[in-house]
Image (spheres, grey):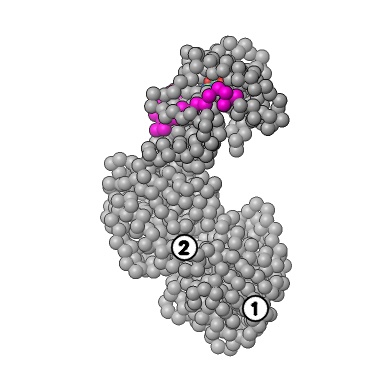
Amino acid sequence: MFKIPFLDLPPLRGAAGTVRLPGSKSISNRVLLLAALSEGRTVVRDLLASDDTAVMLDALRALGCGVARDGDTVSIVGLGGKLLAKQAQLFLGNAGTAMRPLTAALAVLAATQGGSFEVSGVPRMHERPIGDLVDALRGLGCEIDDLGNPGYPPLRLRGPSKLALDTAVRVRGDVSSQFLTALLLALPLVAERDIRIEVIGELISKPYIEITLALLARFGIEVKREGWQAFIIPAGSRYRSPGEVFVEGDASSASYFVGLGAIAATAAPIRIEGVGSESLQGDVRFIEAAAAMGADVKAGPNWLEVRRGAWPLRGLTLDCNHIPDAAMTLTVMALYADGPTTLTNIASWRVKETDRIAAMAAELRKLGATVDEGPDWIRVEPLQDWRAASIHTYDDHRVAMCFSLAAFNGLVAKAAQPVRILEPHCVAKTFPDYFETLFSVVSVNPADVPVITIDGPTASGKGTLADETARALGFGVLDSGALYRVTGLAARRAGLDLDDGKAVAALVPTLQLRFADGHVFLGQEDVSARLRAEATGLLASQVAVHPEVRQALHQLQLDFRRLPGLVADGRDMGTAVFPDAPLKVFLTASAATRAERRHKQLISKGISANIESLRADLEARDERDRTRSASPLTAAQDAQLLDNSALTIEASVDQVLDWWQQRRPF
Ligand code: DC
């Protein structure tokens, strides 16, 4: 998704259909590191393409691994435990799953082979604790320098130094399970003798350790364990690439669609492909929590199907230590419950991408909810009087995805409210096309989908203004002129009499039109360039006078009204096609300015043109569009007039966005 400052979700009314999940973040980054430490090539299929895996891949490249990417498949040629680069500065963004294990692996490698490596990240990364891991590694004999605040990245890992492998490595397990994971992934590098890792304190997020152990086993390392207290890497352990690894779908990402199904899949289920009963990931147990709240869930080996069961949902009290990430979703589901929901044992939320307890509490309150919180718990009351809210996302993908579920408030609220998600691109951390996927399975009342209409005469700059406005808002675009142009072109090619409205209208349903990435296809042919020609504009203006033709194109235009919104430009968008549009703009510019712009445009494309005759053509076309009886070119009564003769494109866009913002409830 293009980086838009906010995404407005109109009220959503229902959900059904199938989603395929992106690859699991936890599995992706563990597999990449294991492949990098192994000898030879590992082909990783269905890898998650996201910010967090991108920083890991960059780091592996910097360390000298071979990395080749082909769509969702990445092949890694590993180091076989030998450092190729002895120095590197690695920027790891906000990826805990890269920072912690790479710190451990590089500390151990630098100790045994020498070298100096710096690991750093975004400012938030430098607030996420790593001291317990650093302490454990220092206890082992690794040399680690704090380059910022002690206990936090950035760090320098250097060597050589002597490792003390004869005593147990001790690590705290009650802040982040990633510290233990990091040691488990890294210490096979030096397993000349049995290595014993002992956990201090109660180990949290145990399912993530299970993922680590299962993946280590896939790479030839069978860790022995004594409950959750001690882990032994047997002497002689060696990473062996399995050759090929398939990454399962992300179970935490599944939670949003499970929640969606529980709230809104009333007719048909939401089917989620990529995780199921055989998943390695602990977060798949989110379905038990969702079921306890009322979701009707069926599970197969690698799929889930979810429908609404109990409604309203049931409030509950739940220890969420085993599903720390997915459990965030429960706090939004709780708004649709019959009583309070209390989640306990979630202290780790406070050291994730943001302080997630504080973040969820603050944003839920903006919707109108009553929320209480403590050091390691949160309680959310159901909500009836929803407020339109602008949700801050704290650069935390899960906050953004969770709050999309608030857009179903119309199913319980007296008056349905839209929800604004700020900085929505933060979902790229784990689910770059989350919102597109969401939109593919939800239903809306078309009237709830916002439309901005931009009408005006030829060459007034409508197209550019519409495109830029749509880009800023993440909306789709309807260039209705293109529909008239393609109709004119096809009618001419078919040898029709352009004055015969009935015949031209009859042609419309037979046209095989496809719109993709700003291009228009007629059958297999990309006719975009053809459509822009002046001559085609004239054909369009001729066929556009017929009411039958306008009628034939009407539904086609309405079909563009899709989530999250539409900017439609033409002559009658505000008057005839979308008369209920909340913002209508009527754009004008003097004929002289318009002729000049058109002239420049043509010249820049290497097409010769005469400014006088262009002006005459424009005026003739305007005259026809204005004086025809069917939907003549005229400003809607409630349109905002914008003369852009003396305005830059940016200034015009800002003006339209300003008007838009004035009409929004946020
Ligand atoms: O916007 P444009 O120049 O691509 O439009 C080409 C012709 O199509 C225009 O002269 C009139 C007609 N048209 C129309 O009648 N209604 C619209 N909504 C859009 C275009």
Corner quadrant of residue 522: top right
Q: Is residue 376 magenta?
A: no
The residue lying toward the viewer, choosing from 81 and 542, is 542
Q: Amino acid at mark 2?
A: Glu
Residue that label 1 marks: 110
The residue sitting at 59% across, 65% down in the picture is 91
The residue sitting at 52% across, 60% down in the picture is 279
- Establish whether ligand 1 lies closer than 8 Å to the Cβ of label 2: no
Q: Is residue 180 visible?
A: no
Q: Amino acid at mark 1?
A: Ala
The residue lying toward the viewer, choosing from 270 and 28, is 28
SS category of the residue bearing label 1: helix
Give the position of the C terminus as an image quadrant.
Answer: top left
The residue lying toward the viewer, choosing from 398 and 629, is 629
Q: Which mark is residue 353?
A: 2
Q: Is residue 593 magenta?
A: yes
Q: Earlier in the sequence, mark 1 or mark 2?
A: 1
Vertical relation: 206 (above or below) 545: below
The residue sitting at 63% across, 62% down in the picture is 57
Vertical relation: 246 (above or below) 450: below
**508 left or right of 455 in image:** right
Q: Quadrant of ligand 1?
A: top right
Residue 578 location (% of width, % of height): 44, 27
Residue 418 location (% of width, % of height): 38, 43
The residue lying toward the viewer, choosing from 646 and 416, is 646
**547 left or right of 186 in image:** left
Residue 477 location (% of width, % of height): 52, 34
